[in-house]
């Protein structure tokens, strides 16, 4: 239904000031949709988790905030990510069985990492899926 991926991270760095915006239109009311977040990173990102803030803005102007903190590694350093030869990927459900009235939506994703940028980022994506 809707998928968008950002992979424009210079030197694989996601700056704190670079808020990613995903905007899309829903043509007809949807009774049940799932929103997923996809994060790809280098093989060894050098951190265990990623602090982010996701905001869903509905057509009526109301917003829904979600704090995301996907775990990339356990305490022993074992990866939770699905790794290939050159990168690793984490996918997580953000919202399930969400009613989505027709209209314009905006999802923003903000880096809440403690430093000026989050290193070793390959891409960020949002997927909205529905059986309708």
Image (cartoon, grey):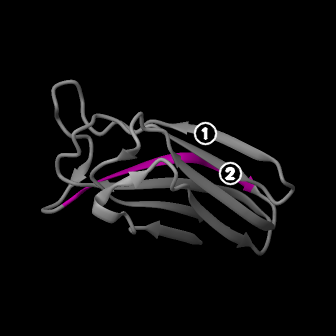
Is residue 119 shown left or right of residue 18? left
Q: Residue at x 69, y 60 (%)?
A: 106
Q: Residue at x 44, y 36 (%)?
A: 69
Which residue extends farthest top? 75
Q: Residue at x 55, y 46 (%)?
A: 94
Q: Which residue is mark 2?
A: 56
Say if 48 sits above or below 28 in the image: above
The location of residue 30, given as percent across then percent down, is 74, 63
Q: Residue at x 49, y 39 (%)?
A: 112
Say if 73 sits above or below 76 in the image: below
Which residue extends farthest bottom? 27
The location of residue 48, given as percent across then percent down, is 28, 34
- First in sequence: mark 1 vs mark 2: 2
Is 1 magenta? The answer is: no
Is 95 magenta? The answer is: yes
**Occupied quadrant, residue 40:** bottom left
Q: Nearer the viewer, residue 49 or 98?
A: 49
Q: Which residue is mark 1?
A: 66
Q: What number is the disc on residue 115?
A: none
Q: Are marks 1 and 2 in contact (CB under 8 Å)?
A: yes
Q: Quadrant of the C terminus?
A: bottom right
**Occupied quadrant, residue 116:** top left
The location of residue 91, given as percent across then percent down, is 39, 51
Is residue 132 shown left or right of residue 80? right
Q: Nearer the viewer, residue 47 or 34?
A: 47
Type of secondary structure dominating the magenta stretch? strand
Say if 62 sits above or below 122 in the image: above
Range of residues picked out in magenta: 87-99
User: How packed is label 2: few (under 14 Cα within 10 Å), some, or many (20 or more)?
Assistant: some
């Amino acid at each position: 239904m809707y998928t968008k991926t950002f992979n424009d991270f210079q030197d694989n760095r996601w700056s704190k000031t670079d808020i990613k915006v995903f905007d899309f239109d829903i043509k007809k009311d949807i009774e049940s949709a799932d929103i997923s977040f996809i994060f790809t990173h280098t093989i060894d990102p050098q951190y265990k988790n990623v602090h982010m803030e996701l905001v869903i803005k509905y057509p009526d102007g109301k917003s829904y905030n979600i704090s995301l903190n996907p775990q990339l590694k356990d305490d022993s350093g074992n990866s939770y990510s699905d790794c290939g030869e050159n990168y690793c990927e984490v996918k997580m459900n953000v919202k399930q069985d969400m009613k989505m009235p027709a209209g314009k939506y905006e999802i923003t994703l903000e880096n809440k990492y403690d430093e000026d940028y989050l290193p070793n980022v390959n891409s960020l994506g949002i997927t909205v899926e529905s059986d309708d």
